Amino acid sequence: MASCQGCTYKTAMPRRPIYAELADELVRDISAGQYPVGSLLPPEVEIAERRGLSRATVRAALGRLVQLGLVTRQKGVGTRVAQAEPGGYDPSTTSIGELAHFGAATHRTLLGTESVVVDEEQAARLGVSAGTRWFRVETLRSDLTTDAPPICYTENFVDSSLPDVIHDIGEYSELIATRIASRYGRVVDEVRQVIRPSVLPPDLCTLLKTRPQELALEIRRQYCSAGKLIYVSVSQHPADRFEYHMSLKRNGP
């Protein structure tokens, strides 16, 4: 596959809301230490005047920082930095923290990268719009501590407006979503996950070192930032190498 190193592509993705762009900038400033933990951000009116924005836009951006756990807001005091990195997200079945632990505890092997415009069939599979451009990155995940066969094969589709994320993807093990946040300030606040059975095609059976026509679990994760889908992963886990555990609790009477 052709490498995307050094390439730039015009994105077909819609522009992010202004408040989300401002929130991304503030996330980067906080992470970089411009606003240390415990310090106050400039007042709404000052941020608005400095950037030529409405106070409503600034208020929405600061509300997003509150949602991410980065700041707290108190009337008469201001917006105080609570932590330098966004807090974990809390869905009912897993957490970003658990996904990050998986990334740190396993090795990612880069198989190839390419720029693609998804057709209707791919779009339906990924849950994106047909005709949009993405960076497609193929990887294998393996256990760091053993010589066991690979854990899974993954196709990653990264928003084409985020080219820096894929240039050194073979050199870091952290989540791609984590790298997107550190490079661009676009913090993932929702992951939509779909799990379904599949049958591995012959080429993946060879790659994953399984028997022919091995059953697998396909996991599609859609990573969203401020309501916008920025990254999709589709992983194939051979059935004998993956278990999915979920606990359901009653809500009220």
Image (cartoon, grey):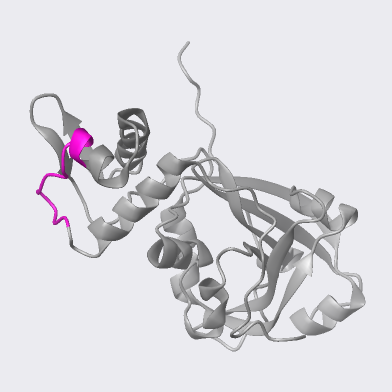
Q: Which residue occupies 82% across, 77% down?
A: 204
Q: State whether residue 84 is above or below residue 138.
A: above
Please identify the residue farthest to the top as the structure is shown.
Answer: 253
Q: Is residue 19 left or right of residue 38?
A: right
Q: Is residue 44 one of those drawn in magenta? A: yes
Q: Which residue occupies 65% across, 63% down?
A: 242
Given residues 18 and 155, the one toward you in this image is 18
Q: Is residue 23 visible to us here?
A: yes
Quadrant including the N terminus = bottom right
Rendering coords of residue 154 (x, y %): 69, 69
Rendering coords of residue 100 (x, y %): 45, 63
Q: Is residue 240 one of those drawn in magenta? A: no
Residue 36 image-quadrant placement: bottom left
Given residues 203 and 116, the one toward you in this image is 116
Q: State whether residue 1 is above or below residue 104.
A: below
Given residues 44 and 184, the one toward you in this image is 44
Residue 137 image-quadrant placement: bottom right
Q: Main secondary structure of the magenta part?
A: loop
Q: Which residue occupies 52% across, 72% down?
A: 165
Q: Is residue 157 left or right of residue 204?
A: left
Q: Which residues are magenta?
A: 35-46
Rendering coords of residue 99 (x, y %): 49, 59
Q: Is residue 143 visible to us here?
A: no
Q: State whether residue 213 is above or below residue 203.
A: above
Q: Which residue occupies 21% across, 51% down?
A: 83
Rendering coords of residue 39 (x, y %): 10, 49
